Amino acid sequence: MTLEPLLILELALLGLCTGFLAGLLGIGGGMLMVPFITLIMSSRGVGPDLAVKMAIATSMATIIFTSISSVRAHHKRGAVRWDIVKRLSPGIVIGSLISSLGVFALLKGSYLAIFFGLFVGFSATQMFLDKKPKPTRQMPGTGGQLAAGGVIGFLSGLVGAGGGFISVPFMTWCNVAIHNAVATSAALGFPIAVANVAGYIISGQSVQDLPAGSFGYIWLPALAVIALASVFTAPLGAKAAHALPVSKLKRVFASILYVLAAYMLWKGLNG
């Protein structure tokens, strides 16, 4: 699969959009990248099962770069709750490795696509319902945050996202302000991405018929173009996140997730 000008343009546009969303919503852009990379790879002759898996792995790899870029912008505004990052990260790394090294390699791409669609649809519904947390609810203790981190890392590894789709609702449910939750989720994207990428590379070494430029399940040409484009727009998204009211932020988050969930469900059911 050659990196022709049209493909470079498609990947660059995807990178610009996902970088902005990473900063705006703290979702790492994975929810947008996975469906589009799947579409791009499928249209160029990669089998549907492998296309979904490589889209998930490549999406996760780009989050390493978008997370660094967007979290710097959030940190300058003092919005990142580093105390939460420190407590969730150990569980995130453990959960991510279990997911990417084991479960991901065993499941069919169509099953992963269906799981992606269902879980993203559920996350969108939670955001639309906008349930108000009890005034007394707070973040759990160290053990509770270790467990929560494990769940976030594991699920992120199955869908190729930075964890914002579960960590942002979780933190707001625990009375963390939405803008702090988004900023903290962006910071959590880094340990999620690094741990999962390591697993995807190792588990993909024995896979046959990988396209040219692959490193395990990661498609390096897409990673390079998307990552380069996304670092320019992630700080713009982070700036916009602090200018938008909470209700609009949640509606934008949920609306995008519904559309992408529907596509991946269709892809999985037809796979």
Image: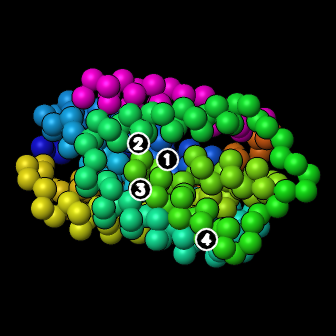
- Image disc number at residue 29: 1
Q: Residue at x 47, y 41 (%)?
A: 31
Say whether disc 4 or disc 3 marks the residue closer to the N-terminus.
Answer: 4
Query: Comparing marks 4 and 3, which lies closer to the viewer?
Result: 4
What kind of element bears circle 4? helix
Distance (Cα) linking label 2 and label 3: 14 Å
Residue 134 among those drawn in magenta? no
Q: Which residue is mark 3?
A: 157
Evaluate if marks 4 and 3 touch, with contact meaning CB atoms under 8 Å apart: no
- Cα distance, mark 4 to mark 2? 28 Å
Image mark for residue 33: 2
Give how far across and how far down residue 245 sits, in percent: 80, 39
Disc 1 to disc 2: CB gap under 8 Å: yes
Q: What residue span does the magenta drawing correspond to?
A: 247-271
Circle 4 residue: 146
Q: Nearer the viewer, residue 90 or 59?
A: 90
